[in-house]
């Protein structure tokens, strides 16, 4: 993503998305693209995340492959509903099948068959159908779901209050409801906040923030090493002779 695209993803996200989609399919009229964007993204924050994700990898418009934010898959589906064939449908991360509807696991989307995969459960250790991915990113079977009785809004409020003690709970409630209203998504958001995870402005993966700015955070994989911060090699241990231990001589 260029610096110009980064700036436009903040100042003019709808215009940036419209331009990227039009470049992938020149037959689509701008007003149809903008209608699809508005229907999918809605709020300003989600539109900015969508613009940043598309600018980071515009090829997703043609290949439909994840990892990518959910909003990207929803936009692909909405654009396909307009009749375009140049824009790709979301492609299953497991089998590659074009999808009309999809299930998310992490940053990938899957068809129904691939979604019901089997793996070693992090709870019981048995190989069973995966029901959820827990707060540590591990698979769990239906009998070992990761139960978290805490209120996700309260968890997010505590995390944000560590950065800004003046933040009020009502502000958090409003912000969370703008990006996700379902309790399951709010719970995952709370877990991500506890891990200090954000969507990287370069690779668009959900990962712990390593550097960057508030509007352009970057993960460790996308953060170049800083010169002069390499730890010096450890000094070799010295061996004392018996004479040294006894005072020399």
Image: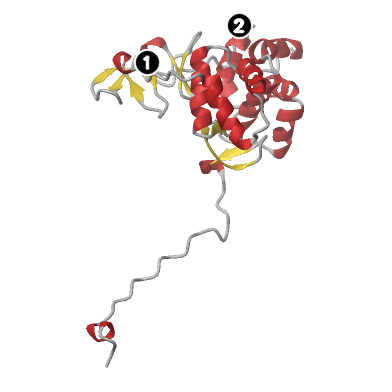
Q: Residue furthest bottom?
A: 249
Instruction: Give the secondary structure at mark 1.
Output: helix
- Taking the image as shown, residue 170 lies to the left or right of residue 146, namely right
Q: Residues within 10 Å of mark 2 (few under 14, many from 20)?
A: few
Q: How is the image coloured?
A: secondary structure
Which residue sits at x=66%, y=17%? 174
- Taking the image as shown, residue 81 lies to the left or right of residue 97, namely right
Which residue sits at x=59%, y=11%? 85
Which residue sits at x=58%, y=16%? 180
- Position in image of residue 112 (x %, y %): 40, 10
- In the picture, the quarter occupied by the C terminus is bottom left
Residue 81, numbered circle: 2
Q: Does any portion of residue 185 appear in the rendered image?
A: yes
Between circles 2 and 1, the one closer to the viewer is 1
- Taking the image as shown, residue 143 lies to the left or right of residue 28, namely left
Gap in angstroms between the C-alphas marked 2 and 1: 24 Å
- Position in image of residue 166 (x %, y %): 68, 32
- Position in image of residue 239 (x %, y %): 29, 77
- In the picture, the quarter occupied by the N terminus is top right
Reply above or below: 211 against 13: below
Instruction: Give the secondary structure at mark 2.
Output: helix
Q: Does any portion of residue 63 appear in the rendered image?
A: no
Which residue sits at x=62%, y=36%? 163
Q: Quadrant of residue 96?
A: top left
Q: Which residue is mark 1?
A: 114
């Amino acid at each position: 993503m260029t610096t110009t695209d980064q700036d436009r993803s903040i100042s003019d996200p709808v215009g940036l998305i419209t331009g990227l989609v039009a470049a992938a399919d020149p037959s689509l009229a701008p007003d149809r693209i903008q209608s699809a964007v508005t229907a999918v993204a809605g709020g300003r924050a989600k539109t900015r995340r969508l613009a940043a994700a598309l600018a980071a990898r515009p090829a997703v418009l043609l290949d439909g492959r994840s990892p990518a934010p959910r909003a990207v898959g929803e936009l692909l589906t909405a654009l396909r509903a307009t009749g375009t064939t140049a824009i790709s449908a979301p492609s299953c991360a497991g089998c590659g099948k074009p999808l009309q509807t999809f299930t998310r696991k992490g940053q990938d989307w899957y068809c129904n068959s691939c979604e019901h995969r089997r793996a070693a459960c992090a709870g019981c250790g048995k190989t069973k159908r995966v029901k959820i991915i827990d707060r540590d990113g591990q698979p769990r079977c239906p009998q070992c779901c990761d139960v978290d009785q805490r209120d996700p809004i309260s968890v997010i409020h505590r995390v944000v209050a560590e950065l800004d003690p003046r933040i009020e709970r009502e502000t958090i409630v409003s912000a969370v409801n703008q990006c996700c209203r379902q309790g399951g998504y709010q719970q995952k958001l709370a877990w991500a906040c506890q891990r200090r995870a954000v969507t990287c402005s370069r690779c668009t993966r959900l990962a712990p923030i390593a550097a960057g700015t508030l509007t352009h955070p970057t993960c460790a994989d996308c953060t170049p090493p800083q010169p002069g911060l390499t730890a010096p090699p450890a000094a070799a241990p010295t061996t004392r002779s018996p004479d040294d231990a006894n005072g020399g001589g």
